[in-house]
Amino acid sequence: MSDVARAAGVSAATVSRALRGEPGVSEATRRYVTEVAKRMRYAIARDASSLAGGRRYAVAVLTAEVGRGDQLSGAEGALRAAGYDVLLYVLRDGEARARFFEELPPLARRVDGVLVLSVDLTGAERAALGESGLPVVALPAGDLRDALRLAAGHVLELGHREVALALTEDLDEDHDELLVAEGLAVRPEWTLWSSPTVPGGEQVAEVLLDGDRLPTAVICSSGEVALGVFLRLRRDGRGVPEDVSIVSLDGPELARAVGITAVEGAGRERGGHAAARLLARLRDEPRDEGAEDRPPPAHLVVRGSTGRR
């Protein structure tokens, strides 16, 4: 620890507080010390520090959205960057969810806090988590619909009416009804499901290419799927956006790199923001009333993958 302190130009006590996530260290200093420690391959003995300070350096994450994984990815990245392990509980269906809350695991002996992603907790479920005595931060479900409305409004403004919808496998088919309500024509064969991967997006594009005609735009719930659609259409000699416009409902780095128009702030950013709220509570940082509870708003970032019809 003393070597890290000398390299970072701070005291050993500051290094200890920064790496343990304790209060009394600015976020900028915490990030800097963490980077120095990583470069020097230094790691705190978590078991020893847990015994000394009562910390587990682990967070329970409850989610129903592993198939898309955008909020989960953002939250997990923020937690791991802060030195916390993630204990994941997937509440994909009603049975798994009921079993979890009926047989609520002894979370207080395993984790320091609970992060709830894309699960709208009932009053009884909130009470059950509250009995654990752990800090709980919940990010409710429903963000995808707001992102979908933004994407629909964008392609409508560009003159598109015939639009395909590429959904990842954990999503309901009624999202196409939202597009129809916004004024878009979605044929049954243009509502497609795939894995949330680039190969999944390539398969979506292959199905569309095999049809009697292409839609003029494709809205993808996953950035990886959008990238796969983009690559497959380009390999077939189709222009993006000249022949088909593409919009993603989240914006991973790879999709940004090739210029895919995306709704950002709806997935990874919100997951990271929720994790930051929980970390602030674990560090006993002063709370700015009202400000910390507002996740970043979803917004459309227009890039080269969309154009006028």
Image (spheres, helix red, strand yellow):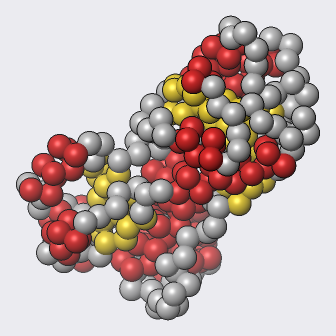
Q: Residue at x 80, y 11 (%)?
A: 236
Percent of width and height locating residue 112: 27, 69
* Residue sitting at the far left: 103
Residue nearest the viewer, comparing 155 with 97 = 155
Q: Residue at x 15, y 51 (%)?
A: 98
Query: Where, by quadrant of the figure, is residue 132 drawn?
Result: bottom left
Q: Is residue 260 above or below residue 268?
A: above
Q: Residue at x 22, y 71 (%)?
A: 123
Q: Residue at x 63, y 41 (%)?
A: 180
Left or right of residue 128: residue 303: right
Q: Quadrant of the C terminus?
A: top right
Q: Is residue 5 above or below residue 183?
A: below
Residue nearest the viewer, comparing 97 with 19 = 97
Percent of width and height locating residue 138: 38, 67
Left or right of residue 299: residue 289: left
Query: Where, by quadrant of the figure, is residue 246 drawn?
Result: top right
Residue nearest the viewer, comparing 37 with 207 = 207
Q: How many marks?
A: 0
Residue nearest the viewer, comparing 25 with 258 = 258
Q: Is residue 258 visible?
A: no
Q: Quadrant of the N terminus?
A: bottom left
Q: Is residue 102 above or below residue 309?
A: below
Percent of width and height locating residue 104: 12, 58
Percent of width and height locating residue 307: 89, 39
Left or right of residue 286: residue 158: right
Query: Where, by quadrant of the figure, is residue 133 drawn?
Result: bottom left
Left or right of residue 229: residue 240: right
Q: Is residue 35 visible?
A: yes
